[in-house]
Amino acid sequence: MARFSAQTVERVKDAVDMVEVVSAHTDLRRQGERFVGLCPFHEERTPSFSVDPREKLYYCFGCEAGGDVFRFVEEKEGLAFPEAVEQLGERYGVEVEREEEDPRAEQERRRRERLWQVLERTAGFYVTFLWDSPKAAKAREYLAGRGLGEEVLREFGVGYAPSAWDQVLTRGQRAGFTVQEIHAAGLIQKGRQGGFYDRFRARIMFPVRDPRGRVLGFGARSMGADAKGPKYLNSPEGDLFKKSRTLFGIDKARGAIAKRGRAVVVEGYTDVLALHQAGIEESVAVMGTAITPEQLALLSGHAEEAVLAMDADRAGEDAMIRAQRVAGARRMRLRVAAMPEGEDPADLLADGSSERMSGLVEAAVDLPVFQVEAALGRADLGSPTARDQALDEVAPVLAAMDPDSVAREELMRKVADRLDTDPGLVTRRVEREGKGGARVSATPAKPATPAPAKPEPPRMLSARERRERALIAMCIGSPAPGREFIDRLTPEHMSSPLSARTLEWVRGHLDDPTAGLPREDEELRSLVIQLKMASDRQPSSREAMELNFLQLEQSLVEDQIAAAQNGDGDPPVELQHRRAELAERIAHWEAGSAPDE
């Protein structure tokens, strides 16, 4: 993994517009020196999300999500820290410098960069060949016949691979790339006689890019009934191209996805181009019928909702049902746009109007509703056995829904009505499914659809923990008087190892507690950032600090007395005197007057 100098990370951080980065995912409004808005990490109606544009920090006082700008990009874009640094550096024009790396890691990084370079050069060659070569005339006619204009084709870098056997190979070698590099990029393949030849020939080329716009591989479409080989041919699986982890068009769509809070997921390359051309720019393609956990993870970094607009045949329905299963703990709402039989999104847009397609997207139903309707629509409801089979299929779907939701109750009533059976029977079957039980039946049991995991609410803090954190936050907010109290506090005053680590970190970094936080200690990072963001909410007077300190001192003395009593002895007299003294001083402070020393 690439490592960056501390100076590089700070230069990138300084250049970033934190409000601009966060605003792609939630609307913010200024509130004093901070910006506030609805949290992009959990559902809420009252804004509890705060952004510090100067320190480049964010924190949600509802779900406790927090971090710096790099952490935000990691979470929302699904990137690792080095990728977040590189992406932000590119976005804000900061040159990213790496520290000296392990030689093997450096070699691997450079090798991957070479693969990206040869893929990018080849993508450019395909584009030039499509628009400039007479031999690509049929490809241009085909694309125009699909209603795709030159503007959108150039925007997505669509090209054409010549029919010659070795143009990519020879051009790559002339540019200084080795046969091994060109082969590792998936652009050539080995023949039976041992030589190499171009993998893609006489095909329309769709470059598949990562969210940062780097070419990972290609999807290639043949033309004409007499074309040899499969209709679609993808790059082979390799170091860069992994079909299950990529989404065609994500580099162009992610901004629109973040703004609109949803992604429209289709199956084909031309569907994505047609949708973008029609203004539905939040569209991406899975390049097949099955959406994968990795693709859902990629989408969940950009949106809270995905509308699946796939072919309305049985394979398409099954793909959508699998999507519900693989969503797992991803906090995404999956909806389905019911496509007319025999038509795909590009067909719906062929007349130049987006009204039909937009209407289907807006009318999309939640995936459980689609699953139930699809199962009932397929079933032969003319016999009790067939109705039992249909109930077996829909019970796991209903059991996975929120048991307190109106939607589930309505679906259960609909199922009972369509199956012409007692609603109580449907309820019992669904409850048994939810408990993991299954009726013995000749019909193979359907795998249960796991309910999307709800984010756990933040743990309730004890009164002592609240005082610890409040005092440290006060000291951060007013470091001049706060230094005295930070120095008076000891790890014994803290109720947990995390609080003790936090105290020691702040003791050494009181003037700038978030600078240089160790990324390997996520608990420490999160708590220090939380306290920094909360520091302006705490009363930072010396009197408030003194009262909190005395209360923590009192808790410490109570611990010492309890420990002595547990040892079957009486607590030392000096501890009892200290407890009484602290109680008196705290009472004076709470009454609003400092006690006489």
Image: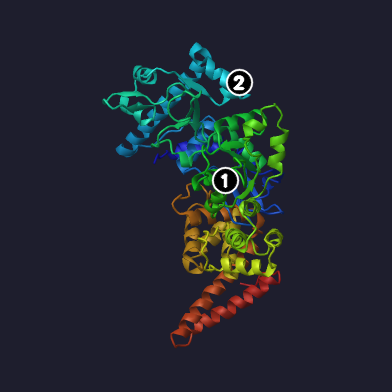
Q: Please, what secondary structure does the residue beneath circle 2 have?
A: helix
Mark 2 or mark 1, which is nearer to you? 1
Is 395 rendered above or below residue 238?
below
Q: Position of residue 171 (x, y in %)?
A: 38, 17
Amino acid at the residue labelled 2: Ala
Neighbour tally class for label 1: few under 14, some 14-19, many 20 plus, Cα within 10 Å: few
Disc on res. 144: 2
Residue 28 on image: x %, y %? 69, 44
Front residue (pair 535, 257) = 257
Measuring from the top left, give residue 421's x and y in whole percent. 68, 65
Question: Residue shown at 50%/81% (left/top)?
Answer: 562
214 vs 417, left or right, is left
- Asked if the residue under mark 1 is in contact with the one under mark 2, i.e. CB atoms within 8 Å, the reply is no
Which quadrant, please, contains the N terminus? top left
Q: Residue furthest front?
A: 382
Q: Residue furthest left?
A: 193
Q: Could you say whether the residue bearing mark 1 is in a helix, strand or loop?
A: helix
Mark yes or no: residue 455 visible.
Answer: no
Picture mark count: 2
Distance from the alpha carbon under mark 2 to that under mark 1: 30 Å
Residue named by callout 1: 314
483, 340: nearer the viewer: 340
Q: Nearer the viewer, residue 50 or 176?
A: 176
Q: Earlier in the sequence, mark 2 or mark 1?
A: 2
- Rendering coords of residue 300 (x, y %): 57, 46
Location of the C terminus by quadrant is bottom right
